[in-house]
Amino acid sequence: MGSARLHCRRRSHHVAPPHSSRPRRLRKGLIAVTRNLLKPFLSVVPFCLFLLMDIYWKYETRPSCDAESCTPSEYLRHQKSIMKSQRNALLIAAALILYWLLFSVTSLLVKIEQLNQRLEKLKNRD
């Protein structure tokens, strides 16, 4: 009976690491969902470029408004316009960085999964 236990221990040593199939399936599902969402989210990139052109156009065509040459309401409107442009620029940067991060991480996870599958095939072949 002691040899049977020893034999089982040896056998479990050569088997692939004990990964639960649930986390693996969950990870595969999340990767698949993220990859499928990245395709429609690609429309964010042209929209960001459009917003950048709009910010540039507003910057180039805006009238110069100093505190002395404008009424207080015009000056306030001018300052609000500048603040909105800065906010939009930050939102554009955040959206592009988020998209790039999602794309990069998803691509890396897909490559890792492919390498894991290759390792499993090589282990099974030997």
Image (tube, rainbow, N blue to C red):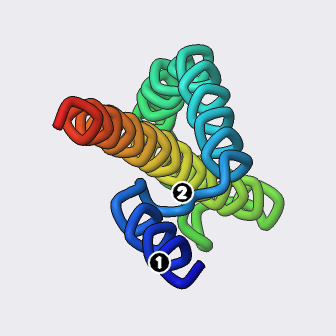
Residue at image position (59%, 72%) is 68
Nearer to me, 26 or 65: 26
Image coords of residue 90 (percent x, y): 54, 57
* Residue designated by label 2: 90
Image coords of residue 101 (percent x, y): 43, 49
Q: Quadrant of the C terminus?
A: top left
Residue 47 seen in the figure: no
> Toward which corner of the image does residue 11 lie, by quadrant?
bottom left
Identity, as a three-letter code, of the amino acid under mark 1: Ser
Q: Residues within 10 Å of mark 2 (few under 14, many from 20)?
A: few
* Residue designated by label 1: 3
Above-or-below relation of 38 to 124: above
Residue at image position (27%, 30%) is 121
**Nearer the observer, disc 2 or disc 1?**
1
Residue at image position (75%, 54%) is 77
Nearer to me, 15 or 54: 15
Identity, as a three-letter code, of the amino acid under mark 2: Leu
